[in-house]
Amino acid sequence: MKTSPATKTLGEVCEVIAGQSPEGKYYNTSGEGMPFYQGKKEFGERFVDEPTTWTTQTTKTAKADDILMSVRAPVGPVNITRNDICIGRGLAAIRVGSEINRDFLYYQLLYLQPEISGKEGAVFASINKTDIQNLRLRVFLLKDQKRIVQKLDEAFAGIAKAKENAEKNLQNARALFESHLQSVFSQRGPGWADKKLEEVCGFQNGFAFKSNTFKTMGAPIIRISNIQEGRIDTENRLVFFNPKDYGENLDRYRIVKGDLLIAMSGATTGKLGFNTEDTAFYLNQRVGKFEPGKHLDKRYLYYFLSTRVEENLRISAGAAQPNLSTEQIKGFVIPLPPINEQKRIVERLDNLADQTQRFARLYEQKLEALVSLKKSILHEAFSGNL
């Protein structure tokens, strides 16, 4: 049944409490004092998760059942607190008055979130107390608010279950591929032999390009940040150089289409990627290129090494940051069947990888459709059509 709501500002029907952070010396992780939330890090699906920080000095507080809004980037996400908590500068608490139902307001703030824009500050995009108070709400009669909340609860519970199933199916599809991948290298047949990488594959580390010679155009450089899951990201974070700035021959650091690379330090240590572009790139330091000999299939090497990323990270542990040396990489031991068997294994794994990617795309499309469905239902609710 279509109803006609009144339009009011949030400040007319709610109290807004802007967060204020205590001094850091009062923080602890041992549960002493009041739970402290600084921003949306502990936001859950609807209610805030358990605290990770407490404070013995209390500044601004939110009461149980208050709605919390993230007021610094990202601006607009909301959650509900089940307990009294201390809130820092990244949050504001919204306490409902007698004219509005808490869950009705929560859903309406979800609906308004795309429109809640922060002001560009020196560090963060942010929204202040006055901005929140000036948000315009559609306020129905309380009985209609409760009816709308009941319908939204039912719809969102169904969406949550569908989302859980889609995510579980996506996880299962990927786990099946990983399980098969691991089994390939543990079930050996006749003619298999363990070989050190350096026995069957050349390896080239990158060149120490100087950052003060980086350009916005010229010859593109691949750095560790460009190594993604199984590919090279050539759209983001690219830098360039002018070969004339260097007096030496850089051909040995040049990579072409089909080359397999590995990140040797930083957060992406051990990650592998193929260059799929026709453009010639150049290797920066801490990025390595594999040069397989005639007894090693390149994609077989990729699949084997992709099962060893965590192990390679353990090998690299102990430094200030993860780091693989050229010597460590050359010393990798590879279970190697005859080249024809390698190609058969690669063909099977390629087919299974294609199937897994198709499943992944299907489930990701389902998840995107569920997000759109939530937006559509919220639109119906706050247009008075639910």
Image: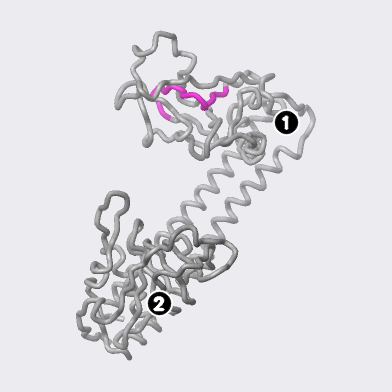
Tag on residue 293? none
On screen, 132 above or below 307? below
Question: For the magenta stretch, what is the residue range?
Answer: 277-290
Say which residue appears at 55% left-offset and 48% top-offset. 356
Instruction: Say which quarter of the image contains residue 330.
Output: top right
Mark 1 element type: strand
Mark 2 element type: loop
Tag on residue 335? 1
Q: Are marks 2 and 1 in contact (CB under 8 Å)?
A: no
Q: What percent of the width, then of the height, locates residue 30?
A: 60, 64
Check disc 1 and give the amino acid type: Pro
Residue placed most toward the observer, 94 or 77 = 94
Q: What percent of the width, then of the height, locates residue 350?
A: 57, 39
Q: Residue furthest right?
A: 190
Residue placed most toward the observer, 115 or 87 = 87
Rounded to the nearest whole Å, what is the CA distance between mark 2 and mark 1? 59 Å
Q: Split into 4 quadrants, where in the image is the C terminus?
A: bottom left
On screen, 299 above or below 348? above
Say which residue appears at 26% left-offset and 81% top-offset. 384
Q: Is residue 278 magenta?
A: yes
Say which residue appears at 50% left-offset and 31% top-offset. 274
Q: How many residues crowd mark 1 within 10 Å: few (<14), some (14–19), many (20+)?
A: some
Q: How many residues crowd mark 2 within 10 Å: few (<14), some (14–19), many (20+)?
A: many
Check disc 2 and give the amino acid type: Asp
Say which residue appears at 50% left-offset and 62% top-offset. 26
Q: Split into 4 quadrants, where in the image is the N terminus?
A: bottom left
Q: Is residue 163 visible?
A: yes
Instruction: Say which quarter of the image contains residue 234.
Output: top left
On screen, 78 above or below 365? below
Q: Is residue 176 magenta?
A: no
State the residue position of label 2.
Answer: 66
